Amino acid sequence: MTDDKVKRIRAMKGRERIAALTVYDFAMATMVDGAGLPLLLVGDSLGMVVLGYPDTTQVTLADMEHHLRAAARARPQGLLAADLPFGTCATPATAVESARRLMAAGAEAVKAEGGRSILPQIRAILSEGIPVLGHLGMLPQNAVLEGGYHVKGKTEAERQGLIADALAVAEAGAFAIVLELVAAPVAAEITGRISIPTIGIGSGPGCDGEILVTTDLLGTSPGFIPKHVKKSWRFAEQMRAAVVEWKESVVHPNGR
């Protein structure tokens, strides 16, 4: 079944655009999968939008396993992938062990941030029969060291590096690559040069699809909503209004 889901995503390149979202628990996975998306990601973005951390680097493998198990209980029809969190992909051996743990918790694929610098890790994971989703461009796990979230590919050196990374990750056997905050012309160029799908996040319309943090789309992320989210449904305001209305009915059961 997992092989079929992976093949389906690979086959969408050039034929059908890919829409993907993050999920963090049973209810969210059930809702998102009901929309018929081919890919669901238990992202380490849960650190910020669920656990209240300032960035993704504090998310542990145990955190990922906990949320992954909850999402997996929804038995989604879409492929359920999971992020390898910060520090769990340092060597081929640790990458394989981490990937195995995520698969045991219910993942059907893992996502690894990085290109040529982690090719041995990607190859090691793939040698275990575990599908790999690549991630290039702005790497959230590096954002603290880089002083924030910055668009990649603006310089010629960055452009060449991203293209080389994408070609290498594709050649290694990844089934798709997430391109996060990559300059739109560079993302489009990468998309045209590799045989596997690119799934953009803030990288322009030239990718083979798009992935968003679901709480950004729904407008329930605490605080900041990235500008690449073209429409946020602002459900947080409606949820808050519902709570206030209910509270008033409890405090003043007979009206004011």
Image: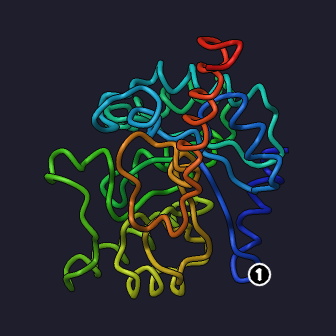
Q: Residue at x 76, y 41 (%)?
A: 31
Q: Residue at x 80, y 53 (%)?
A: 35
Q: Residue at x 61, y 77 (%)?
A: 195
SS label for mark 1: loop
Give the farthest residue toward the front. 256
- Name the image quarter holding the N terminus: top right
Name the one closer to the observer, 207 or 1: 207
Residue 252 in picture, x, y percent from top left: 62, 14
The part of the image, by quadrant, that contains residue 196 is bottom right
Q: Is residue 248 above or below residue 221?
A: above
Where, quadrant-wise, is the C terminus in this rendering?
top right
Q: Observer-nearest residue: 38 or 92?
A: 38
Q: Residues within 10 Å of mark 1 (few under 14, many from 20)?
A: few
Closest to the observer, 220 or 203: 220
* The one of 70 and 7 positioned closer to us in this rendering: 70
Report whether residue 127 is seen.
no
The residue that appears at 45% across and 73% down in the rendered structure is 167
Q: Measured from the top left, where is residue 174 in percent x and y?
A: 57, 59
- For badge 1, the amino acid type reads Arg
**Residue 122 percent location from the top left of the image:** 47, 49
Residue 17 point in image, percent of width and height: 70, 74
Identify the residue under disc 1.
Answer: 15
Q: Is residue 238 left or right of residue 91?
A: right
- Structure colour scheme: rainbow
Q: Quadrant of the rendered structure where residue 114 is?
A: bottom left
* Count of marks, rendered view: 1
Residue 98 drawn above or below residue 81: above
Q: Mark yes or no: residue 191 visible.
A: yes
Q: Is residue 45 above or below residue 74?
A: below
